Amino acid sequence: MNAAGLKLNDNFRNNFSLTRELPDSLNALDTISSNFLWSWNIEGISIFRDLDATLWETCEQNPRRLLSEISELRLWQKANDSNFVERVNKFADFQSRYLEAKPKNFGKISAKRPVAYFCAEYGVNNSLPIYSGGLGILAGDHLKSASDMNVPLVAIGLMYRFGYFRQKLDQHGFQTEKYLDSFDNEIAVSPVFDENGERIVIHVKMRGRDVFAQTWLAKIGRISLYLLDTNIPQNTDLDRLITGHLYGGDTETRIVQEKILGIGGVRLLRQLNIEPSVYHLNEGHSSFLTLELAREIIEKEQIVFAEAVEKVRKLCVFTTHTPVPAGNDVFPPELIDQCFDSNYIKSLGLTHDEFVAFGKIDADDKLEWFGMSPLALRMCRSANGVSEKHGEVSREMWQKMFPVTKAEEVPITHITNGVHAPTWIAPVFKNLFDKHIGKDWTKVLTRESSWFKSVEKIPDAEIWNTHLLLKQQLIAFIRERKESAKLFDKNVLTIGFARRVAGYKRWNLLLHDAERMAAIINNSDKPVQFVFAGKAHPQDIKAKMLLQTLLHETASNRVTFIEDYDQEVARYLVQGVDVWMNVPRRPLEASGTSGQKVAMNGGLNFSILDGWWIEGYNEINGFSIGVLRDKVADETLIDQQDADSLYEVLEKQIVPCFYKKDSNNLPVDWIARMRNSIQTLTFQFSSDRMVKDYFEKIYC
């Protein structure tokens, strides 16, 4: 049994090919479902849903599983539906044309020398369960925009057999975890072979032995995402579990995972004959790749480590997502000794102490642990935070590593995160944009002034009625998930709050004055209803207790919690709420992207001025909590002030504005804010803008 209580069996999955035979007229469904392009196109999604809507939900929107489980009768019924067959063929033609386009060149970056994007998790779609939260969703959106923009990029990650946990609350409201074996399901990945038809397998030495990893390929539109997997017979049971769980296990598991990702990822690229022009380390998890590049250069050119570092730095860029030192992976020196054999260190021409020093903020501090972020900062030519404020925080956090006297002189910039509009904008809003802006509205979106003017033309009533459709869908979803939420009402102001359960996210800020909060929720004339969602890390008992307390103290017919927060739950929430609330302890929100998704669907953000919201808020397109502060001396006092601000803004601004209607029963002032949210935030915080910034400011 492994750490999660799951028993390994002897079934080694060689591929995920569809085992059933499809009718000839529907053969294209195999090809369509093999590429995640369908997941951000309305017609792609509707094709699979229309095969069997009930089974589609049962299969958790996994088209490969749907095609495996759908009844033979239903399949042949659709095969005899000429309209449906025509839709399938039309989408297959669209996919073929989309994939045939040659990638664009960006100076030295080309199809032959692409960007290599490394990340520990990717949130592409629910049916590829290798993500836990914001970092993964951001990485998935990065790949989708890179695909739509047709830029040369390949991605490297890990194929987690048991993924991230599924959440369930027990009868006392305490979070429990369950892991599912992804290999018992159908996933849209395929095995990767070399030119001789042999399965590509890489190996990395760790803990005194060679560990082997096979390779899977997930197609994200035009982008290839290669995933390394140690669950193969060549490895011991312990090593097979290296890629077992995302963010599971102990510190030792974490370091060996990161060796497979970084060192193994570089070795995989060599076997694929891919020679990247840029290596993008998206967070510090893949930092070991820089050491492997240095080892290669030393071996090939017979130069010393210091000279190799200069060559590595020209190739590598680093994005940090974590605004506090404690959030960065660090490992005790003895664990480095255990997982890195002495021969690898010698191949770099370094002593043990010199090697460990490269991962320290203070290279001379004998007690400091080895950190992945300091390693990345030393080995990369550029580093960036994920919002303007986060860039500033990062410069202060890592100032000791640089020979500068002022934090502003630290060479860390920022690229503010964005989200993939075609993925997160609801179909009904896409249809509204088709109608009033044109079928090419995604192109208009790339021109900020044109987008602003185009959205201005959409009638108030159509914006509001489109939102109401989504809100009613959300409420239906909530009622189906939660029996206790039957009283949720489409006419009541609905506020969403969904994110990781962690101390700095301040889930309990609402309860600072429980009586005042209850009065706001239960106001007879202008009530408010809340929907919560989020997971606590399995090992974070304090966070689990915080969640339990919140749910106990907010027990109400107008407050509900949706279990097992994932992409599908997120989609209902960000598309259907009136208001999206975010109350992190400033300045610990590196960026935040869930609120950006809400804004694209006309929802209004109600947030602490931190992360992306500092850049996005203009006093019309949403609401702020508290004020900007540079330093926080007394957290208790700040919590009190922010809670007071939260209540006051709710009582005096949000609630009155929402419930104020004109003679046509339209909340015109509220709609004006919704319109401005769509106008000002959709362009600014799209992942297309973000990827463009990376190519123009970081990669080139």
Image (cartoon, rainbow, N blue to C red):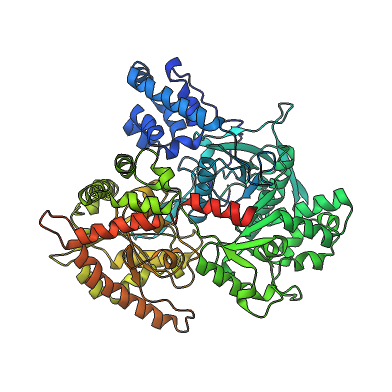
Instruction: Name the outermost residue toward the left.
Output: 663
Can residue 557 be seen here?
Answer: no
Q: How many marks?
A: 0
In percent of the image, x 34 and y 45: which residue is there?
426
Q: Position of residue 354 (x, y in %)?
A: 81, 67
Counting from the top left corner in percent of width and height, residue 128 is at 50, 41
- Determine whether 458 is above or below 497 in the image: above
User: In the rendered image of this protein, does residue 319 appear above or below residue 21?
Assistant: below
**In this image, 267 relative to 326: left or right?**
right
Left or right side of 532 for 67: right
In percent of width and height, residue 114 lies at: 66, 44
Residue at image location 61% in from the left, 37% down from the top: 216
Specify whether 461 is left or right of 51. left
Figure quadrant of residue 79: top left
In the picture, residue 253 is in which quadrant?
Answer: bottom right
For residue 119, above or below residue 216: below
Of residues 434 and 574, the one nearer the viewer is 434
Residue 63 picture location, percent across and down: 44, 32
Residue in view at x 60 percent, y 72 percent: 395
Residue 253 can be seen in this image: yes
Residue in the image at 42% along x and 27% along y: 69
In-front residue for pair 428/554: 428
Quadrant of residue 523 in the image? bottom left
